[in-house]
């Protein structure tokens, strides 16, 4: 039964699930969530045929849990690295059961020095452990060895780098948005019949209408066979910004928008690739604002937790939702054309490709192009931004790192990932945290100084000193806790934290007994009460015990008198006033 109580539809009679492995056992087919297939031919590996077949079997078993070609490609590359290593051995084994612990030690040593190598070790180990022949013995023990986590390499932009990249993205996207807005107003005026007959604006409006319906301006075939712009004089030029770019974002301009969205919301590229156009919901009590419901699709969260929504409000120029409003406006014509060419298509991040006839959809995990339109940000677009702005790494990875550290909380990832990958390895976070760590250390030092025995250890009693329940007092008039009317106002337990206190062997039995009672009290009361009322006194006694040494301290317990027991009981009950 389904979750709503309806009987599930059975497959047709005779239906059999398609097997991922070919009849010869050497070709594995991986199907992604969109239904696209990709084949991996293990006959290409430089190892014997029997090992090729064994690797294909474990690869196919691993592939059952994959929903993207990206996972398959990454695993396939690791398999090729392993096969190349095996083929380079002096006596390569014919099959996986011929691998020895010594071979795997060499394999580990060759890979463990780099982050990519560590990832390769993890991937290959997962495959080899699927072979039952490697489940026991020295090889299994070698495979079970811990592989260190890759060293975190992510860092965020410096403030100067951030400002430079954001300024470039803002300028590029703003110019594109204003260009599209201006031409949209002209197109709407033409469609409403508000432009003068015979004017340039009216002729341009007709060209824009053709562009909105087809994705390109009218073109004429020249005598040489090339296609030229028909209304070049009206358009002003034949470049992208003057022709089809009047209503559509270019891929570079869509990349600039993605940079701004990543900085604002820390969404990664896979989220932007598949993000539907945000829907609007009414803002209660706010007539001038609009709230967008943005759908986030993140497959790394695991099955059943792929989709979530975020509510983002546009309430003014500086509000987070203003960028969403601008993105919807700038991509409106692209989204309308995509829905016309392929009904049901409704993705926010859409651009018009420069060379439509040369476009090849190579990454089947990303949305497929529709006519001249492409969706999301391809790796080549990110690389273009990196090269143009002379960055050390992907602008999106660095911006995401900056946003996560700025927000100080997990964004589409777990708390553990937030701390171990984004926050702790970041040099800027480490630099900014030094003052916090220093202040904490100083506070801890000051606290530690207040919970040690502050008095003096004496060999005998001094007749000039005044005896108290826990020590002898040298001068009660100079007490750190004076009475308003004079004298010492501290409890007898606080005597151990006063510099006027003198402890001689006559005090040792009752203090050792007090230490013993406080230790037993720890299990009799709740932690909060013990830490609040007794911890400081217990730590001072611990410090005094360390100064005297364990032998005299333990011997003092043998000299405890009934008077000592009564005195300590009164102290613990709070019945002994100073």
Image (cartoon, grey):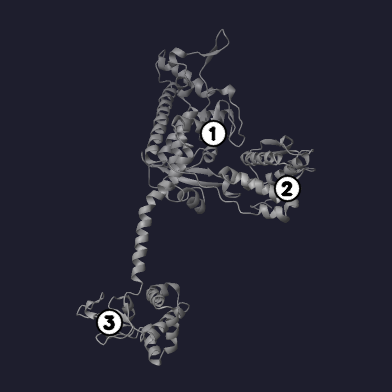
Above or below for 311 versus 450:
above
Q: CA distance from mark 1 to mark 3?
A: 77 Å
Q: CA distance from mark 1 to mark 2?
A: 38 Å
- Residue 39: percent from the left, percent from the top? 70, 36
Q: Which mark is residue 99?
A: 2
Which badge, 3 or 2, comes first in the chain's sequence?
2
- Residue 89: percent from the left, percent from the top? 70, 41
Which of pointers 1 and 3 indicates the residue nearer the eye? 3
Which of the two residues, 210 or 142, is positioned nearer the viewer here? Answer: 142
Whether residue 239 is visible to the viewer of this picture, yes or no, is yes
Q: Which residue is mark 1?
A: 379
Which of the two residues, 225 or 435, is positioned nearer the viewer here? Answer: 435
Above or below for 496 versus 116:
below
Whether residue 119 is visible to the viewer of this picture, yes or no, is no
Give me the residue at 50% from left, 21% from top.
211
Label 2 CA crowd tier, 10 Å (few <14, some 14–19, many 20+): some
Above or below for 458 versus 416:
below
Q: Which residue is mark 3?
A: 473
Which badge, 1 or 3, comes first in the chain's sequence?
1
Q: CA distance from mark 3 to mark 2?
A: 78 Å
Label 3 CA crowd tier, 10 Å (few <14, some 14–19, many 20+): many
- Residue 197: percent from the left, percent from the top? 41, 14
Above or below for 131 versus 81:
below
The picture quadrant where one finds residue 191 is top left
Do the numbered discs 1 and 3 sit on residues whose CB atoms are within 8 Å?
no
Which of the two residues, 518 or 457, is positioned nearer the viewer here? Answer: 457
Do the numbered discs 1 and 2 sit on residues whose CB atoms are within 8 Å?
no
Do the numbered discs 3 and 2 sit on residues whose CB atoms are within 8 Å?
no
| Label 1: which secondary element | helix
The picture quadrant where one finds residue 539 is bottom left
Which badge, 1 or 2, comes first in the chain's sequence?
2
């Amino acid at each position: 039964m389904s979750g709503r109580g309806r009987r599930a539809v059975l497959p047709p009679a005779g239906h059999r699930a398609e097997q991922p492995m070919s009849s010869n056992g050497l070709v594995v087919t991986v199907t992604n969530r969109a239904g696209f297939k990709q084949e991996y031919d293990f006959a290409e590996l430089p190892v014997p045929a029997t090992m090729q077949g064994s690797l294909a079997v474990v690869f196919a078993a691993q592939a059952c849990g994959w929903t993207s070609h990206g996972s398959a490609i990454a695993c396939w590359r690791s398999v090729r690295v392993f096969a190349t290593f095996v083929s380079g051995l002096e006596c390569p084994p014919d099959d996986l059961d011929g691998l020895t612990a010594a071979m795997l030690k060499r394999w580990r040593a060759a890979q463990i020095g780099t982050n990519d190598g560590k990832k390769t070790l993890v991937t290959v180990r997962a495959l080899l452990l699927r072979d039952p022949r490697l489940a026991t013995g020295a090889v299994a023990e070698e495979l079970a060895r811990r592989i260190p986590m890759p060293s975190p390499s992510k860092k965020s932009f410096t403030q100067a780098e951030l400002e430079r990249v954001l300024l470039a993205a803002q300028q590029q996207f703003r110019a594109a948005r204003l260009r599209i807005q201006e031409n949209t107003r002209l197109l709407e005026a033409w469609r409403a019949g508000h432009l003068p007959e015979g004017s340039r604006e009216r002729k341009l409006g007709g060209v824009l209408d053709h562009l909105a319906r087809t994705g390109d301006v009218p073109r004429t075939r020249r005598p040489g066979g090339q296609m030229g712009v028909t209304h070049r004089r009206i358009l002003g030029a034949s470049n992208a910004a003057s022709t089809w770019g009047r209503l559509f974002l270019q891929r570079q301009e869509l990349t600039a928008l993605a940079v701004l969205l990543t900085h604002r919301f820390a969404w990664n590229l896979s989220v932007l690739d598949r993000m539907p156009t945000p829907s609007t919901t009414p803002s209660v009590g706010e007539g001038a604002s609009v709230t967008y419901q943005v759908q986030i699709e993140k497959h790394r969260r695991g099955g059943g937790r792929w989709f979530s929504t975020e509510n983002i409000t546009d309430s003014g120029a500086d509000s987070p939702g203003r960028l969403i409003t601008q993105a919807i406006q700038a991509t409106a014509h692209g989204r309308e054309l995509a829905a016309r060419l392929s009904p049901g298509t409704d993705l926010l991040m859409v651009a018009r490709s420069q060379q439509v006839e040369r476009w090849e959809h190579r990454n089947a995990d990303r949305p497929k192009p529709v006519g001249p339109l492409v969706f999301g940000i391809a790796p080549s677009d990110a690389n273009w931004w990196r090269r143009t702005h002379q960055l050390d790494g992907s602008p999106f990875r660095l911006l995401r790192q900056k946003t996560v550290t700025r927000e100080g909380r997990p964004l589409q990832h777990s708390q553990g990932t937030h701390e171990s990958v984004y926050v702790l390895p970041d040099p800027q976070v480490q630099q900014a945290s030094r003052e916090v760590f220093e202040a904490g250390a100083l506070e801890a030092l000051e606290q530690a100084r207040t919970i040690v025995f502050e008095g003096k250890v004496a060999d005998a009693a001094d007749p000039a000193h005044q005896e108290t329940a826990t020590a002898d007092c040298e001068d009660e008039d100079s007490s750190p806790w004076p009475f308003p009317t004079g004298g010492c106002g501290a409890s007898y337990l606080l005597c151990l934290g006063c510099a006027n206190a003198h402890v001689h062997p006559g005090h040792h039995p009752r203090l050792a007994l007090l230490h013993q009672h406080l230790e037993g009290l720890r299990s009799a009361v709740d932690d909060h009460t013990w830490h609040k009322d007794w911890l400081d006194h217990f730590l001072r006694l611990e410090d005094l015990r360390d100064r005297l040494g364990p032998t005299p301290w333990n011997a003092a317990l043998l000299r405890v008198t009934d008077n000592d027991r009564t005195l300590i009981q009164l102290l613990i009950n709070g019945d002994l006033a100073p």
